[in-house]
Image (cartoon, rainbow, N blue to C red):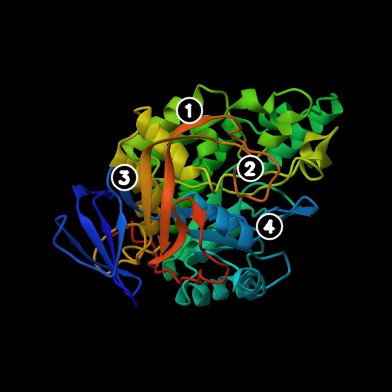
Amino acid sequence: MTRTLIHGGLVITASDEVHADVLIEDGRIAALAAPGVLTADRTIDATGKYVIPGGVDAHTHMELPFGGTFASDTFETGTRAAAWGGTTTIIDFAVQSVGQALREGLDAWHAKAEGNCAIDYGFHMIVSDVNEDTLKEMDLLVEEGVTSFKQFMAYPGVFYSDDGQILRAMQRSADNGGLIMMHAENGIAIDVLVEQALARGETDPRYHGEVRKALLEAEATHRAIRLAQVAGAPLYVVHVSAMEAVAELARARDEGLPVFGETCPQYLFLSTDNLAEPDFEGAKYVCSTPLRPREHQAKLWQGLRTNDLQVVSTDHCPFCFTGQKELGRGDFSKIPNGLPGVENRMDLLHQAVVDGHISRRRWIEIACATPARMFGLYPKKGTIAPGADADVVIYDPHAEQVLSAETHHMNVDYSAYEGRRVTGRVETVLSRGVPVVTEREYTGHAGHGVFTPRSTCQYLN
């Protein structure tokens, strides 16, 4: 294996910014040293650039079956797009269907991903059917590196768990060290509001946001926090979109509870204005939790600065506008829920640095280091330090680009950020020392990425 030296860049981690050369050997970081000290067989010039850890996107849905169709990115296309965007690890969601064992769902997702990924990947397990067998299986999955379990307070009849099922899974995770991830929306109440809206003839995409009320996200967040408190278990709330939900998380954290929250770029950069776009264009922006009015954004940024929100991941779940989003013409409740974003996250968060919302180190913390720690991948992933996997991105902080479906690599026919100009762009990406993007050319291949077992949450220590 050759020795590679990344020379002349500013190395940025969650804790430090230092001008240093980075030596890579056998797929790992071997050393950091003052510029000019180390030598190697191959040198990558990073002068004037940032040298950052590869992004860890802890929330993606490749090939997810939903609403009578499938997410349009496969593990091959989705991980390639992730690499283009400077993300070198994804954690996707294996799905247990009702009546099925967890193992069946996990095996099915292993089969989808194995040999197809450009970058490393792990799995969370969606638990749709809590029973004695499921609870026992949770222990076994934790032992083999699937250490987080997602439950839904939404989608009755599909993924939904009632409070009793949620409590039982939380009690089990309190014993086995697993982390419960919660989709916190009151789905039973939302279904009533959906039915009433459709009966009034309110069928356009914008009503998706109006029926999935912020108060019903906040109520479910509060309920999940208290159930976790009863169970003595930590809790991670996914895709937090509403200021009222952030307030619930902040209150719980002020009480000293091990409660964590993620948000996503769509909630930081998009709003109900997008959902209201005419001619059914708003369907492109239908996701759950939904986009909120613009005034929620300031509270989400504040939560990221105060660490009441710890992670930004994408909830990447793309559906093409033509033929998929269109399934909901005339009935917003039939629009497949999800947005493409796995390729855009690192760039949008760098734009947030440029705009003054967050610092450079906080960018790396919320996009790389904390997701790695939260889900048991640190310090193998999420940092640049001796012994870590050489997942490294050379990032040009000055390059300008315009986000567009014309130029992105996700397998979807629109961009949620079409025409948005951002400053900063990925130039070169290494995954375990292997170049997968080289000076804006794709040099990776399906099958390079491997399944990565995870330890339990390291953010609690």
Which circle's residue, 4 or 3, is located before the other in the chain? Answer: 3
Instruction: For residue 233, say whether it is visible.
Output: no
The answer to whether 214 is drawn above or below residue 315 in the figure is above
Q: Nearer the viewer, mark 2 or mark 3?
A: 3
Residue 340's label in the rendered image is: none
User: Around disc 1, counting alpha carbons within 10 Å, would you say few (fewer than 14), some (14 to 19), or many (20 or more)?
Assistant: many
* Distance Cα–Cα, label 4 vs label 1: 28 Å
Residue 402 visible in the snapshot: yes
The residue carrying mark 2 is: 339
Label 4 vs label 3: CA separation?
36 Å
Along the line of sight, the residue nearer the viewer: 49 or 366: 49
- Residue at point 83% right, 30% down? 198
Q: Secondary structure at mark 3?
A: loop
Q: Which mark is residue 49?
A: 3
Q: Nearer the viewer, residue 162 or 62?
A: 62
Numbered circles on residues, count: 4
Q: Position of residue 72 (x, y in %)?
A: 70, 53
For the residue pair 426 and 177, the one nearer the viewer reads as: 426
Give yes or no for contact between labels 2 and 3 (Cβ–Cβ under 8 Å). Answer: no
Gap in angstroms between the C-alphas marked 2 and 3: 30 Å
Residues under numbered marks 4 and 1 in contact, where contact means CB atoms less than 8 Å apart: no
Residue drawn 36% across and 34% down?
353
Q: Earlier in the sequence, mark 1 or mark 3?
A: 3
Mark 4 = which residue? Answer: 64
